[in-house]
Amino acid sequence: MSISRNKYQLASVVISVVISNPAWSDEVVLIGNVAPTTGSIAHLGKDQENGALMAVEEINSKGLVIQGKKVLLRLDSQDDAGDPRIATQVAQKLVDEHVVAIVGHGTSGTSIPASKIYSDAHIVQISPSATNPTYTQQGFKTTYRVVATDAQQGPALAKYAATTLKLKTVAIVDDATAYGQGLAREFENAAQSLGLKIVSRDATNDKAIDFRAILTKIKGENPDAIMFGGMDATGGAFAKQARQLGMHARVLAGDGVCTEALSELAGPATDNVICSSPGISLGKMSGGAEFAAKYQKRFGIPVVSYAPYSYDAVNVVVKAMKSADSTNPEKILAAMQGTDYKGVTGPIAFDPRGDLLHGVVSIFNYKNGKKTLLDEIRM
């Protein structure tokens, strides 16, 4: 596929801890990173990129030797703007640039269409944040992820709503993306099996800013809660407008909404949000406090969400590289199934599809705008 210079023009940057003097190395190896670093969820994409960059910088500073050669890693970072069409263009671009592995993409809606391109090229793709089950159910041997799936996250959130919050009725709204629809579907199936009544099912889109028509309809249905499948940029406005309409229903959401940035987007309405995340909380991670401190020192901002997962994703790729004693993409891919790595986010090992063997889903609420852990559910 050729890359045209049109409105979907690609943005990229190759990042390395050593930019102008790679003389100490015998080989320079590119690891691709793809995330939405522009657009409404750019804060999440930049967080992913920062985590991957931190891992590359640390590995380079320690020195990496493969087949007796000194290897310098460089992060080939691409912006797909959360757009599936740009994602496939970016994927082909990275294949053409001979990256040895991909960290990304940042969303399910971009990870899934890009995955066939990486599969055709026999390049491992390890996502730090794509949760839609379809991503690893396509029969590709190249797809991996370091987070739990929506098939785990949706039921965990539904179970918490039914058994802990004792809710009886729920309205469901999704943003019509692969992520939002997938999470909402998994939640709905689990909720119904637990005896929750679904009073309505509506869809918006991931660019929407005004939800008052949908919310006014739902207000008339008077549910105990509204489950919103989407990202924080839309979920924040959704929760805020529900509060402005005087609605008392809880807002339930997944990891796309469950970020540290939500309080800035929703204001006091965050206090009515219960959300899930497909992993353990940063404060509970082994080395989480140390990671947070290093991240703050390096970038001058706190972790938003996915940085620890992209950090671990890079380290998993490098561990496979060491196990294969090769920088050949196909040999790295062959070593991935044997992964047994203790990362910042926890123990990482994969089933034959590339999903984590031991998934954990965390449940949070917000108190005075601060994200607070309520429960951990091991799947």
Image (spheres, rainbow, N blue to C red):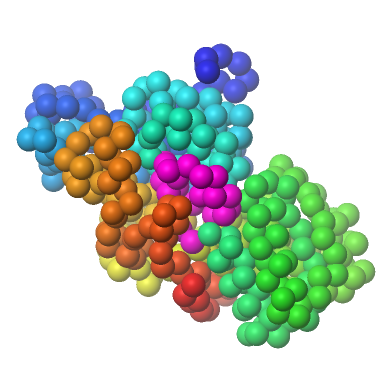
Residue drawn at x 31%, y 48% is 336
Q: Is residue 268 visible?
A: no
Q: Compared to 186, does 250 lie above or below? A: below
Tell me if residue 134 is in the magenta stretch.
yes
Report the front residue among 251 and 338: 338
Residue drawn at x 34%, y 60% is 349
Tell me if residue 165 is in the magenta stretch.
no
Q: Measured from the top left, where is residue 21 in percent x and y? A: 15, 24
Q: Quadrant of residue 23?
A: top left
Q: Compared to 22, does 281 lie above or below? A: below
Report the front residue among 339 and 139: 139
Identify the magenta region.
Answer: 125-148
Q: Measured from the top left, where is residue 81 in percent x and y? A: 56, 35
Q: Is residue 287 left or right of residue 95?
A: left
Report the front residue among 242 and 78: 78
Q: Measured from the top left, where is residue 333 in percent x and y? A: 32, 41
Residue drawn at x 13%, y 45% is 62
Q: Measured from the top left, where is residue 167 in percent x and y? A: 74, 81
Q: Is residue 59 left or right of residue 179?
A: left
Q: Is residue 128 left or right of residue 273?
A: left
Residue drawn at x 62%, y 51% is 179
Report the front residue among 275 and 148: 148
Q: Quadrant of residue 325?
A: top left
Q: Is residue 362 visible?
A: yes
